[in-house]
Image: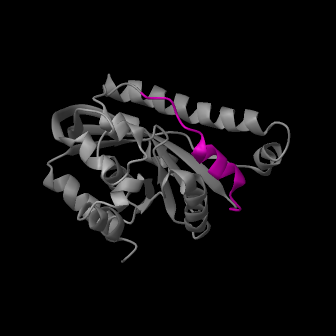
Amino acid sequence: MSLNRPLEISRTLVGALSTQMFRYYEDRIPRDASVLVVSNHRSFMDALILMAALSSPIRFACHHYMGQVPVMREIVTGQLGCFPLEETQNRQQSFFSQSQVLLQSRQMVGVFPEGTEPMVKFTVPNMVGEFQRGFAHLALRSDVQNLAILPIAIASLEEVNTSGFPLKFLSVFDPSEPLFNQGGWHPLVIYRRVAVLIGRPYWITPQHQKKYHGKQARTVVAELTEHCQTEISNLLRQGCY
């Protein structure tokens, strides 16, 4: 697969869905650095939107089931270059090892710290869920020089909400995910008009990594997670109003 193939597909699909996209603060995108993209997540379009907005392929960590469902697997992994996480017991180590290899080769890696929940529930555009801390641990333990975390808000200005398929259908492919063992339908959010607001990059320094290996590890992880969540929340409010 060509490294630029995911970007080409993203632009094509965003255009085919007639989505009008607005970019803000693109001058904040780091150059000549390893970049970990962190964003809010409500729609199957989010990875496409971020690649189109940053004009760059991004290797996204995605849910385990996406690597199990036929057709979806070919699109998500084969065409868009995402890497599905392993089953629950191996998920964290799989995420760290795959992401570090990609960052070391100066590829952009994308993470949605809210996890699966906002994708399987109907949510409102201006709200951000609680961030999981895996991306902060990844950034602080990675043996990568010149690493920036780039928080980005995807603010829906106009969208269509519909239902896709029963949630229990996904439990066939990942029975370990409790969110799939409930009634209801998987929502589909299609953006008609969307704003992409790029936050201030957070650079990982030797001082951060030194704290991570000491007694302050929990504190520096919490600070990094809170910084990104706050930055995205503020940008989201700015974009939605």
User: Please, which residue is most extreme toward the right here?
Assistant: 214
**Position of residue 195 measured from the top left corner of the image (x, y, whole percent):** 31, 37
Residue 129: say if magenta: yes
Query: Is 220 displayed left or right of 52 in the figure?
Result: right
At horizontal 28% and vertical 68% (from top left) the residue drawn is: 74
Q: Nearer the viewer, residue 27 or 216?
A: 216
Query: Is 201 displayed left or right of 216 in the figure?
Result: left
Residue 134: say if magenta: yes
At horizontal 64% and vertical 51% (from top left) the residue drawn is: 139
Q: Is residue 180 above or below residue 83?
A: above
The picture quadrant where one finds residue 102 is bottom right
Q: Is residue 185 above or below residue 172?
A: above
Labels in figure, total = 0
Q: Nearer the viewer, residue 218 or 86?
A: 86
Can residue 171 be spotted in the picture? yes
**Position of residue 200 measured from the top left corner of the image (x, y, whole percent):** 55, 40
What scheme was used to colour the molecule? Answer: one colour
User: Please, which residue is most extreme toward the bottom here?
Assistant: 1
**Position of residue 4 measured from the top left corner of the image (x, y, whole percent):** 36, 71
**Position of residue 173 measured from the top left corner of the image (x, y, whole percent):** 33, 55
Quadrant that contains the N terminus:
bottom left
Can residue 154 be spotted in the picture? no
At horizontal 59% and vertical 45% (from top left) the residue drawn is: 134
At horizontal 26% and vertical 60% (from top left) the residue drawn is: 72
Give the magenta range.
Answer: 128-144
Query: Is 59 displayed left or right of 239 in the figure?
Result: right
